[in-house]
């Protein structure tokens, strides 16, 4: 892995000024150049495991649209999330940093105050640790390169009113959950919005009036009808439909499916799986976590993935209808491995036992994720690729694809002597070109379970509470056989990687191996 020169944002104002300067030429040639830049839609789902799609071998869940996306594009077999849990994984994607360098390395919550929505108590301010404002994030780079930007779904990069909310970080239109704690539920009391077109000057709350007539927990919860996943998707579709091809667009669609509570409209998708899974399991509920009791947990989970697949199909159909598909890169991935929250049963759907581990673990099952890219005429249709990449490679890849060749020098902050950009562009892999650079290693760390992960070639080390465990993925993909005692030289090399890559954080602590 390369540690490049620093790449930071001096201030949001300066970044936008630079962006404006870069595109001040209003000549016909300049406009034509802007139009030729590829549009990008990145669909990031929530807690979908590596094997949860049919095109990755799933036997029980139908995903025809994502299968089509893979058939028309490139399916990656060794792509990794930035972290085994949500907020730091998304931060890795946004910042181009791994979790030894990134400010956000866990799900650190910011909640304060109380207010009521009907009979339902909520926090007055809610959200997560803000992104580092001294470090540029991906939407700001896209904005500086002439893109209009929309984000729909989970933010998880700053609490309400903080210095890092969508309106302050390069997003033109936003609708979804600022707080990922709120995003555990699909019939919430409110959503968040920032819309330039609607005249918003900051992120605001949009109360869901029908929902708040009913209780958050208990039988009355079933009477809520405003389903957040549909609301988010509708807003995303409306934004895409407004795109006319005159300005390149970047859409970051962070859908919450199939995360957390297993509940959704009881429509034909759910009915199909209820008939398919006989003697299904149930979940008793947990009022402390706000998860209601659920029947037919397997049917609900499968339906959530098929529902997400339906959304993807509608996006592809709309791009075709508008004549935008040919110049639009569509990427799809998941923020981490599968979860067990709210009654989810990943063991049932992963019966092949391909990967060990779940969300919150640095084993392969917690961090290896589905990753599909389609760009008609540019990315080879039906290709399967074993290039090893991680979320922090997204930023340099996008920069390559949009022609931003000097972003490191452009956004360096001379007042910040040390900063890190850990990614390597995989644009050559996508475009079938020679010269693809490879990582020397991949790196993860996660405080909540006190784990560190390092992959170096086929070697994989998982450090748990300071104790290293070594596996050879070429012969032991399931990470069953710890061979650390047999290869002290490899263990020592990986310890040296950890010592160099881990920058101390006052907020997130892990035990380093001796």
Image (cartoon, rainbow, N blue to C red):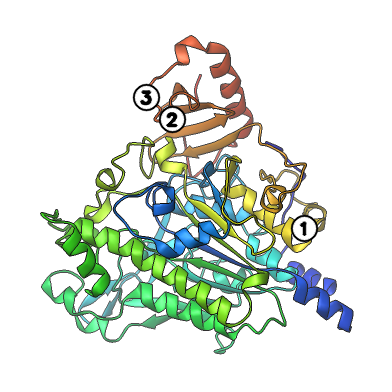
On screen, residue 512 versus residue 301, left or right, reads right
Q: Is residue 374 above or below residue 359?
A: below
Mark 1, mark 3: which one is toward the viewer?
3
Which quarter of the picture shows residue 274? Answer: bottom left
Residue bearing mark 2: 477
Residue bearing mark 3: 480
The tag earlier along the polypeptide, 1 or 2, is 1
Mark 2, mark 3: which one is toward the viewer?
2
Q: In this view, does 123 lie above or below 361?
A: below
Mark 2 element type: loop
Q: Position of residue 501 (x, y in %)?
A: 62, 33
Q: Position of residue 479 (x, y in %)?
A: 40, 27
Q: Can residue 185 be seen in this view?
A: yes
On screen, residue 312 versus residue 349, left or right, reads right
Of all residues, the one furthest to the bottom in this rendering is: 198
Q: Are discs 2 and 3 less than 8 Å apart at CB?
A: no
User: Which residue is drawn at the image coordinates 74% and 73% (left, top)?
Assistant: 146
The tag earlier along the polypeptide, 1 or 3, is 1
Q: How far apart are marks 2 and 3 (CA)?
A: 8 Å
Residue bearing mark 1: 411
Camera-side residue of 503 and 89 = 89
The quadrant the N terminus occupies is top right
């Amino acid at each position: 892995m390369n540690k490049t020169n620093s790449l930071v944002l001096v201030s949001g104002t300066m970044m936008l000024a630079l962006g404006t300067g870069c595109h001040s030429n209003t000549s016909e040639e300049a406009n034509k150049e802007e139009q030729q830049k590829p549009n990008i839609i990145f669909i990031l789902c929530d807690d979908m495991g590596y094997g949860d799609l049919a095109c990755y071998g799933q036997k029980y869940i139908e995903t025809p649209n994502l299968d089509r996306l893979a058939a028309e594009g490139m399916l990656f077999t060794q792509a990794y999330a930035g972290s085994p849990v949500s907020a730091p994984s998304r931060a890795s994607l946004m910042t181009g940093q791994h979790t030894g360098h990134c400010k956000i390395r866990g799900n650190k919550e910011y909640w304060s105050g109380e207010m009521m929505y009907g009979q339902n108590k909520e926090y007055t301010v809610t959200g997560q640790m803000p992104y580092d404002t001294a470090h540029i994030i991906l939407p700001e780079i896209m904005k500086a390169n002439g893109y209009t930007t929309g984000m729909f779904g989970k933010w998880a990069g700053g609490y309400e009113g903080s210095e890092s909310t969508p309106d302050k970080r390069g997003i033109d239109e936003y609708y979804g959950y600022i707080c990922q704690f709120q995003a555990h539920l699909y019939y919430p009391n409110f959503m968040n919005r920032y819309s330039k077109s609607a005249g918003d000057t900051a992120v605001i709350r949009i109360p869901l009036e029908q929902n708040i007539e009913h209780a958050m927990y208990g039988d009355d919860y079933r009477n809520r009808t405003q389903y957040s996943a549909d609301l988010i998707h509708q807003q995303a579709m409306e934004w895409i439909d407004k795109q006319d091809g005159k300005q390149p667009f970047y859409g970051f669609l962070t859908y919450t499916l199939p995360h957390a509570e297993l509940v959704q409209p009881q429509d034909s998708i759910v009915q199909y799986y209820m008939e398919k899974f006989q003697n299904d399991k149930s979940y008793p509920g947990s009022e402390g976590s706000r998860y209601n009791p659920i029947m037919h947990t397997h049917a609900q989970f499968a339906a959530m993935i098929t529902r997400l697949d339906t959304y993807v199909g509608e996006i592809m159909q709309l791009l075709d209808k508008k004549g935008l598909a040919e110049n639009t890169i569509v990427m799809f991935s998941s923020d981490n491995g599968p979860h067990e929250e709210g009654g989810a049963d990943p063991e049932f759907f992963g019966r092949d036992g391909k990967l060990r581990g779940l969300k919150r673990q640095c084993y392969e099952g917690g961090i290896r994720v589905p990753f599909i890219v389609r760009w008609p005429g540019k990315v080879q249709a039906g290709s399967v690729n074993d290039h090893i990449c991680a979320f922090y490679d997204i930023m340099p890849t996008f920069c390559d694809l949009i022609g931003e060749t000097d972003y490191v020098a452009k956004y360096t902050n001379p007042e910040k002597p040390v900063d890190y950009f850990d990614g390597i562009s995989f644009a050559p892999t996508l475009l079938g070109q020679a010269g693809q650079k490879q990582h020397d290693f991949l790196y993860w760390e996660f405080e909540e379970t006190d784990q560190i992960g390092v992959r170096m070639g086929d070697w994989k080390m998982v450090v748990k509470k300071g104790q290293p465990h070594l596996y050879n993925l070429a012969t032991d993909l399931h990470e069953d056989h710890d061979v650390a005692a047999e290869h002290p030289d490899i263990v020592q090399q990986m310890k040296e990687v950890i010592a160099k890559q881990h920058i101390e954080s006052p907020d997130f602590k892990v035990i380093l191996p001796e």
